[in-house]
Image (cartoon, rainbow, N blue to C red):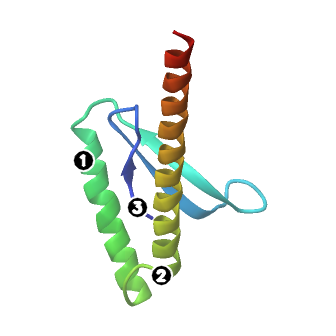
Amino acid sequence: MCLQPNIGSNPSWVWKVAAEYSETPPTSETLAIRFANSENAPEFKKEFEAAQRTNAALRGGAPAEASLIEEKKDEAEKEEKEDKDENKDETKDKKKEEKK
């Protein structure tokens, strides 16, 4: 799991989990947390990452490779979506210019 800033909502974080167990069957989910003030967000991140290190040490090593692969995949999908959104905006702008 990797904390990422929640775009458009400061101060908040989002992260993905492979299995969220509040429902049956467990599902992959994106979770978010928003804070009342900007001082609490970095403190949460610090504690979140400390807990990850503690859990990794208890498991006997680094974070699971599967979660790292999932994070890279999510980052690539996010970048691809951003590129598509930019292309849509450029197309709209060109159409507006052509109408003028």
Kind of residue sitting beneath label 1: Pro
Q: Residue at x 48, y 32 (%)?
A: 90
Q: Quadrant of residue 95?
A: top right
Mark toward the start of the polypeptide (1 vs 3)? 3
Question: How far apart are the alpha carbons under marks 1 and 2?
Answer: 25 Å
Kind of residue sitting beneath label 3: Cys
Residue to which mark 1 is pinned: 42
Nearer-the-camera pick, 10 or 85: 85
Q: Is residue 24 left or right of residue 56?
A: right
Q: Residue at x 39, y 90 (%)?
A: 60
- Numbered tag placed on residue 2 in the rendering: 3
Mark toward the start of the polypeptide (2 vs 3)? 3
Q: Residue at x 45, y 65 (%)?
A: 1
Discs 1/3, front: 3
Query: Is residue 34 positioned above or below 51 on the image?
Result: above
Name the secondary structure under disc 3.
Answer: loop
The picture places residue 27, in percent across and down from the top left corner, at 69, 60
Mark toward the start of the polypeptide (1 vs 2)? 1
Name the secondary structure under disc 2.
Answer: helix
